[in-house]
Amino acid sequence: MKPNKPFNSFGPKGLLIAIIVVVGLFAVLIQLKDVAKDIGTISYKEFLDKVRQNQIKKVHKSGQFLSGLTHDNKRFETVVAERPGDFDLLEQHGVDFSVSTPSMSTGAWHLFLILGILMLLAIVSGAYFMRQMKNGMKGGGGSGGLFNIGKSRAKMFLPSMIKERFSSVAGAHEAKEDLQDVVDFLKDAPKYQRLGARITRGILLVGEPGTGKTLLARAVAGEANCPFFSVSGADFIEVFVGVGASRVRDLFAEARKKAPCIVFIDEIDAIGRQRSSSVGGGNEEREQTLNQLLTEMDGFETSKDPVIVLAATNRADILDKALIRPGRFDRQIVVPVPDLVSREEILKVHLQKIKYVADLDIRGLARGTPGFTGADLANLVNEAAIIASKKNQEEVTMYDFEEARDKLMLGKESKTMILTDYDKKVTAFHEAGHALVRLLMPKDTDPLHKVTIIPRGRALGVTHFLPEREKYNRTKEELLASIAAALGGRAAEELAFNEISTGASSDFKYATDIARDMVCDYGMSDALGKRVYIDSYERKGGFSEKTYELIDAEITKILNEQYDVAMKLLSENRDKLDKLSYELLEKETLYAAEIYELLGIEPRVDLRLVK
Ligand code: ADP
Ligand code: ZN
């Protein structure tokens, strides 16, 4: 029997030529398509910026893909990072939008055919590019240092190209402090590994767009003097299943070669969103990509040169739980919207780039821009410079800044971030209430760190700086004090405005949880005695209706008593409450030491720390 002829009887050289021809055709095809439709792919963030600048006429969203037209009739495409609020933004900027589900229409068969052909081409060309890339990478670094890593679309920056340092990032002191660990580790990994210390390899930077997450990530690379790979989550996702996963693989293969280094993934929610149960087109690709990322991160433990992954998101809560497990992105660093002092610092950084009048009221500018992010402030400075240039001025004046601010404010109005003056005042009293009750309670074991009325995350209002539930033993007195402090926010609102807002529900939950544990878990209630009820209580069974009612009554009693305690403390110290609230309104963030000084209270010593 004659041996079967191999499939490609024309030998490896012929295959290469065939591939090149096919790829060439493919490239031409793609180009033709792009030229014909004039389509540009932009990142989702760019898209949102364009909306805010009123450049978008209409958009159509189909599944995760969004295409549209700008006012100057340019087509563009982008991949959507899910944020339901963005539809409001579209509406506010008069964008004509429509949505459809990516479904199979009747004439879908020829679409299948085209897809099939394209898929084949993609596989062939993918294989080709992969080879090309492997060859290209070997001597690639020389050509200017910045190059595309095959199809991963990540950009690599060599240390010499990274100008950013921590000093380039104004404000964000806590984030910088946290990231200093990463810098130290990158600089001298063996020092930590010597004793077997496990250092976090994945860090989430959580904050609104424009708060400086990218800037911080680059600054870490700059400080550590190591290479920086930058990519957006949306860049991984393509129509073809498997491309994303392979891009992730490529990226990390390259990163490992350059380790120690940093990989920065912007908009990680595009791949890291919670897996939904629904079976849909775009999902499988996203899941494969996510799985590949997880696999890569699990492999980090064993390598000795660290690759640190910094990922940015504005919503940590929608991320897949698998992503935030230990060994993956197990650390979160919040990059807040800047407070007054930080806004002033950021303005100073950006003012260095323009010529402005000597007596510019920078503090006043900072005061007039609550809710502005670092990017907004950079934009403000630039906009003011443009306004002044148009008027042929020599220097930018305060008047130009005000004009620029008003213009930008209009675009920002839709954002929930900006508090009305009244909201801000209520929030100030609320937060002052928490802090003051905590300070004035006879027992204070939760050291006060800081109080702020700057909104964090997406929520209107503020996340309260109540202590985490602690693990060590706490006395009954301490638990009661925590409840009073939690209720102090609402008590202060009632005292100052004689009306109550909805902004305290998480406080109530916190307080109720403690009270319930006291009664059901710690045996701290006289009426119910020293026994554990918690399991039965949560199941609402296992004991009589009467016992259940008794427990409920006990919990309510504890809460009411502590609310009264908070109310009494605050009304007896009304002067301090007012003083603290108005100072908060003015400064937006106050640290413990500032509060002690303002109110003339002796700082408390944490008794557990005194031997
Ligand atoms: P994010 O990644 O959080 O969306 P970026 O890091 O891209 O935000 O910030 C965009 C721009 O805004 C930066 O390039 C910088 O000019 C400016 N900016 C943001 N935060 C700061 C800051 N803390 N200090 C100085 N400039 C900032
Ligand atoms: Zn509160």
Image (spheres, helix red, strand yellow):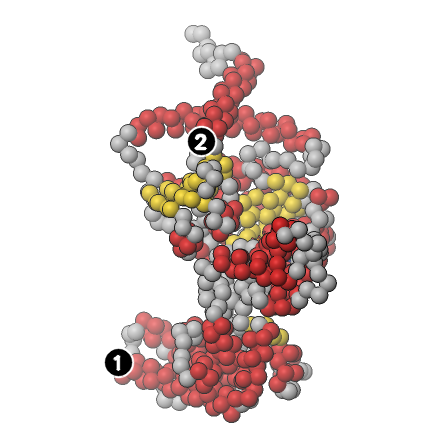
Instruction: Check disc 2: other Cα within 10 Å, few if <14, some if 14-19, many if 20+.
Output: few
**Which quadrant of the rendered structure holds the N terminus?**
top left
Residue drawn at x 52%, y 74% as measured from the top left: 466
> Which residue occupies the foreground of this view, 425 or 185?
425
Mark drawn on residue 581: none
Looking at marks 2 and 1 on the same chain, the residue that comes earlier in the sequence is marked by 2
Which of the two residues, 360 or 466, is positioned nearer the viewer here? 360
- 529 or 408: nearer the viewer: 408
Q: Is residue 103 left or right of residue 249?
A: left
* Mark 2 vs ligand 1: CB below 8 Å: no
- State how far apart marks 2 and 1 are (Cα): 70 Å
- The residue shown at (50%, 50%) is 53
Q: Quadrant of residue 510?
A: bottom left
Determine the image quadrant of residue 75. top left
Indicate the amino acid at tag 2.
Answer: Lys
- 10 Å crowding of disc 1: few (<14), some (14-19), many (20+): few
Q: Is residue 312 left or right of residue 168?
A: left
Disc 2 element? helix
Looking at the rendered structure, the secondary structure element under dot 1 is: helix
Residue located at (46% from left, 84% from top): 496
Q: Is residue 189 visible?
A: no
Q: Which mark is residue 37?
A: 2
Which three-letter amino acid code belongs to the residue tagged 1? Glu
**Which quadrant would residue 153 be assigned to in this image?**
top right
Q: Which of the two marks, 2 or 1, is nearer to us in this view?
A: 2
In the figure, 335 relative to 56: above or below? below
Instruction: Assign the C terminus to one quadrant of the image.
Output: bottom right
Residue position marked by numbered label 1 in the rendering: 545
Q: In this rendering, is residue 264 above or below 197?
A: above
Most extreme residue toward the top is: 1
- Residues marked 2 and 1 touching at CB (< 8 Å): no
